[in-house]
Amino acid sequence: MSDDCLFCKIINGVIPADIVDQNDTALAFRDINPQAATHILIIPKAHIASTRDLNDGNIHCLSEMAVMANKIADSEGISESGYRWVINTGNDGGQTVHHLHLHLLGGRQLQWPPG
Ligand code: AMP
Ligand code: ZN
């Protein structure tokens, strides 16, 4: 938990969010500024600032997030049509919220390469 972290505040219910799924390790909620018909953020409940802070002691949260993302892709109906996972890291990566999050994007044809 980090006092000034937006996503920690969502985890603690201080800031409302449209929660899609959660368990002891991970939480999923709809992005407030969706870039596709399905745009859901999956985050660890522990405050991990970015991929740079993943290590042997906390890496299990990433597999929990991946399994949750797969479950949500099924419930959103995008498993067959396809989707994209995105994790932005640091300034050049476009990270604006410094609590690790996996973007699950789908429901339209996504372009490549990203901007
Ligand atoms: P990133 O640029 O990878 O750090 O992504 C941060 C994401 O968080 C952006 O897609 C924002 O739209 C999203 N976001 C910011 N504030 C909120 C919020 N209060 N609830 C849901 N999503 C948010
Ligand atoms: Zn946090």
Image (cartoon, grey):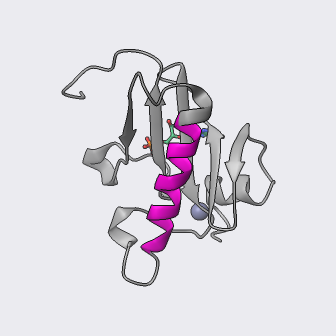
In x, y percent, where is residue 100? 47, 58
Ligand 1, what quadrant? top right
The quadrant of the image that shows the N terminus is bottom right
Residue 94 in which image quadrant = top left
On whether residue 91 falls in the magenta region, the answer is no
Q: Quadrant of the C terminus?
A: top left
> x and y percent of residue 85 in the render?
38, 41
Which residue reaches farthest bottom? 57
**Where 109 sits versus 30, above or below?**
above
Q: In the image, residue 97 lies at what x, y percent?
A: 50, 50
Residue 78 to residue 3: above or below? above
Q: Is residue 31 visible?
A: no
Q: What span is in magenta?
A: 59-73
Residue lying at the far top of the rendered structure:
108
Give the residue at x 49% y 26%: 78
Lateral position of residue 9 relative to residue 81, left or right: right
Q: Is residue 74 left or right of 113 when viewed as pictured?
A: right
Above or below, 100 relative to 25: above
For this rendering, which residue is in front, 110 or 67?
67
